[in-house]
Amino acid sequence: MDRIIEKKTWNTKRLLTIGGITAIVLLIAGSIYFTSGKSKLDVDTERLTISTITKGPFQENIPVNGTVMPLTTIYLDASDGGRVEQKFVEDGANLKVGDPIMRLSNTDLQLRLADEETAVYAAQTQMEISHNNAEQYTIQKLQNMAAVEIAYKEAERIYNLDKDLYAKKAIGLQEYQTATNNYNYQLKSKNLATQILKQDTVTVKQQDVQSKEQFTQMKNTLELLRQKVSDLTVRARVAGQLTSFTAEIGQDEKAGDPLGQIDVLSGFKIRVSIEDHYIPRVFTGLKGFFQFDDKTYHLVVQKVFVQIVNGQFNVDMAFVGPTPTGIRKGQTVQVTLSLSDETTALLLPKGGFYQQTGGNWIFKVSADGKKAYRVPIQINRQTTDNYELVSGLEPGDKVITSSYETYGDIQELILKK
């Protein structure tokens, strides 16, 4: 007798088939999920820095390192060089104007001075001799002129007399002609002597002027050499503190070699170093400030040095208002330099996130505070505390500003408390 066998709905083959299909679907779904960038990571909120986007006053500024320097520094150098013979003070000494610092010896310069003194004395003697000779020559010319004038007047007298006598037929033509010729000769002699005397006077004056000019130039050269020899004793040109003075007795100093400097301690300035890409935006008049002994002191850019060294350039900043009491030369301070006027902007607090994102995106915390997801942002300028936010967020939004170093390509953070 035949028996009806019931067919099993969930046999082994069907279960294996369904299981295989399910595994494939899950594999595909997981692949789609993970390749779609929706990777997640659980993070502890205690390890995060969560900041709020605000709207407020913004003034772009950058932190720069500054060094306190004297307001005025006078540099000492060897104008002609020489050997260090004597030191009157040591480095760090406080000097008054005219105080001797050191004495150099320069044999060549001193010999030149002696030669120039001899030449000047010789020129002075020669000039006096020439002047005396010129005076004697002039006297001779004047004496000759006097004799010529006497002879002329006598010839004129005889001529006039003979002229009258000849007219009266008292003398003959020959005698009258002799008087006439003598008169004409003496007249020409007088005119020639007068001309020679005038030329001689002009020549003597020109020679005298030239001699005096040459002698004056020689005296100026002599005074210059005397000053150079005098400058071998280096003196303080201003009152202040001697620094960087390292000369030693017996040491040879070449012309132009630095010998030290005198710092005028009547005031201070701050010299700051700035990265070279800021050079188009830094100019005189920019303002800054720094903290010293819990007080804020304001500065203004006074001079910009355009020379770039190791990717940086320097500026000198002067104090606006009082100078801090107790500040010392060489002291380092951190200055906040303002690069713009104050405006109103969205403020994004600074944090470690920038190193991984470059300011192109940030993790924004959801409204319920349970997760954070990537959002693109755009930032512009910066201060020491904030970035100027251009787009991507609104006031009141909360964002994670701590470092993203361990997040990799994670797209969403699950915030755990």
Image: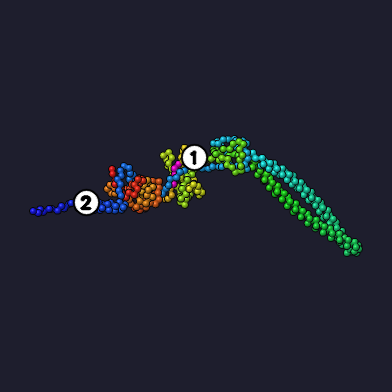
When the figure is inspected, residue 232 is found, relative to residue 202, above or below; the finding is: above
Q: Nearer the viewer, residue 322 or 397?
A: 397
Question: Pointer 2: what residue?
Answer: 16
The boundaries of the magenta stretch are: 333-337
Residue receiving disc 1: 330
- Residue kind at label 1, given as amino acid type: Gly
> Is 51 on the left-hand or right-hand side of 134?
left
Secondary element type, mark 1: loop
Residue farthest to the left?
A: 1
- On whether residue 335 falls in the magenta region, the answer is yes
Badge 2: residue crowd in 10 Å (few <14, some 14–19, many ≥20):
few
Q: Amino acid at mark 2?
A: Leu
Q: Is residue 36 left or right of residue 181?
A: left
Q: Is residue 247 magenta?
A: no
Residue 194: image quadrant is bottom right
Position of the C terminus, as image quadrant, is top left
Instruction: Report the front residue among 240 and 67.
Output: 67
Q: How far from the left and from the top, in percent, is residue 180? A: 86, 61
